[in-house]
Image (cartoon, helix red, strand yellow):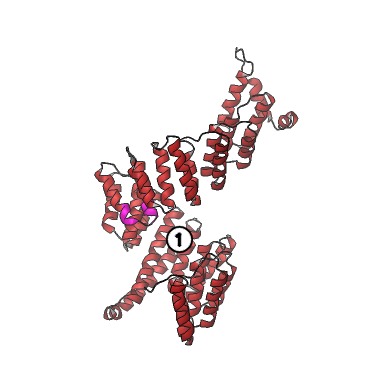
Amino acid sequence: MLSTKMHAEVISRHLIFTLQKSPTYPTKNPCQPLSEKLLSLLKKCFSTRKLREIHAQMLVNSILRPNFLLSKAIDLKDFTYASLLFHRIPEPNDYAFNIMIRGLTTTWQKYELTLEFYYQMRVLGINPNNFTYPFLFMACSNLLALSHGRVAQSSVFKFGLDRDGHVSHSIITMYARCGQLVCARKVFDEITERDSVSWNSMISGYSQMGYARDATALFYEMKDAGYEPNEMTLVSVLGACGDLGNLSLGTWVEEFVVKNKLKLNSYLGSALIGMYGKCGDLSSARRIFDSMIKKDRVTWNAMISGQVILTLFLISYVVFSPSTIYLVRNSTYFIYAQNGLSDEAIMLFNFMKEAGIDPDKRTLVALLSACASVGALDMGKWVDKYASQRGLMNDIYVGTALLDMYAKCGNLDDALRIFENMPKKNEVSWNAMISAFAFHGRATEAISLFKRMIAEGGATRPNDITFVGVLSACVHVGLVDEGRRWFDMMSTSYGLTQK
């Protein structure tokens, strides 16, 4: 315990004055009025400094209310002080553990510690309850800790909590985030009394994990069962509509929003913009964007990404469409379209900056894709400088997008600089650099980098895109025998088949 003298020194004059002026109440327990006064002040506390002062008074007057103090420390988001308070509780009960687990999960996102506190709770013989498990499964979801999630689910059955709605919904989300959609659906199907949260958990799981058809199919089931979709439902369905290119259902969602006078906030508005962008209806995406009074970073990102996605689609159409005559006749239109859309994305980015919205990682990746598609090297260099100043260069997605932009703009030296400085590299990073060397005729360097990937890639293994780059490099320099050797290795060593 801290000394009484130390606590006394941190008590503010205002607090002492307040306590001195407080009336006395006729009671057998002389500490009761002071206890009530301190708890009242604790509820109104708005800073850690005030919390420490109240804590000091409680210690001085032997008033023990550790759970109240702990709850307030978590509300004030002071991890250090909350941890100190918790570990000074001689025998923490289930309430103390639960509020600490909640804080670790939702306030501080310290998911590993959530698991540690849960297991400490079990070791002490304290039974978890329906306030424990939703946050535990949330931590498992974010850590993709499937094994811990399965063990926790077995405990849910042991304690008879499998019929609790909040627990079941969190289990569905955990399985979905871990890619176990069959297990998630099994939990969903076993819920006897479903509510909108049950449906949303499963629809969201399908949508976020790329099972767009299952998401829309379950949405229709939800409507047929008489449940009214809410904002969360609509956002998940819009994501699925974008992935499927289902403009009809996406338009129905917008009509539903208008008919039911739902507020077009950033969450719903950005989902509509993203859906229209992915479906190629940029005029509708821009209409939604312009109609939104408040635009945050998510909204701007959705609009910029929509421009970039359609640009890349047009480019791929130009390159891969089998209709040569149609392409020749319309090549001017497509070149104008792809440049216009990418320029529009860059212009939107400039408007975003003027509006005082700082770009984040997602913004930069979308912008770099636009720069790469039209060869906007100067803007790409600006992003490089901006990312360095903001400490975003260590992000694997920003780094790979920068690498790709420099390579497509013909600046291989800077592409290689970005690649070598990346602290972590995934398959996409290696493939982008290997393909860049191969595309620009630097076959020897491409093959050398491929060998290096095999040697030091660790868990990162070559995939079909890697081999396309390597074989292309072999073709450039006439390495027929070596190309055949790599081709054979593709199936024998890596289990890849021709597509």
Quadrant of the drawing holding the C terminus: bottom left
* Residue 66 visible at all: yes
As rendered, which of 403 and 364 lies closer to the eye? 403
Of the residues shown, which amino acid type is indicated by label 1?
Answer: Phe
As rendered, which of 331 and 190 lies closer to the eye? 190
As rendered, which of 436 and 279 lies closer to the eye? 436
36 vs 371, left or right, is: right
Residue 231, compared with residue 460, is above or below; it is above
Q: Position of residue 92 (x, y in %)?
A: 59, 32
Q: Quadrant of residue 280?
A: bottom left
Q: Quadrant of residue 303?
A: bottom left
Q: Secondary structure at mark 1?
A: helix
Q: Position of residue 46 (x, y in %)?
A: 58, 35
The residue shown at (35%, 61%) is 277
Residue 409, compared with residue 73, is above or below; it is below
Query: Is residue 148 highlighted in magenta?
Result: no
Quadrant of the drawing holding the N terminus: top right
278 vs 427, left or right, is: left
Query: Is residue 206 highlighted in magenta?
Result: yes
As rendered, which of 10 and 286 lies closer to the eye? 10
468 vs 55, left or right, is: left
Q: Residues within 10 Å of mark 1 (few under 14, many from 20)?
A: few
Report the magenta stretch's main SS: helix
Give the residue at mark 1: 351
Q: Position of residue 319 (x, y in %)?
A: 36, 76
List the single residue furthest toward the front: 492
List the single residue furthest toward the right: 5
Q: Magenta stretch?
A: 204-215
Q: Position of residue 178 (x, y in %)?
A: 44, 52
* Residue 287 visible at all: no
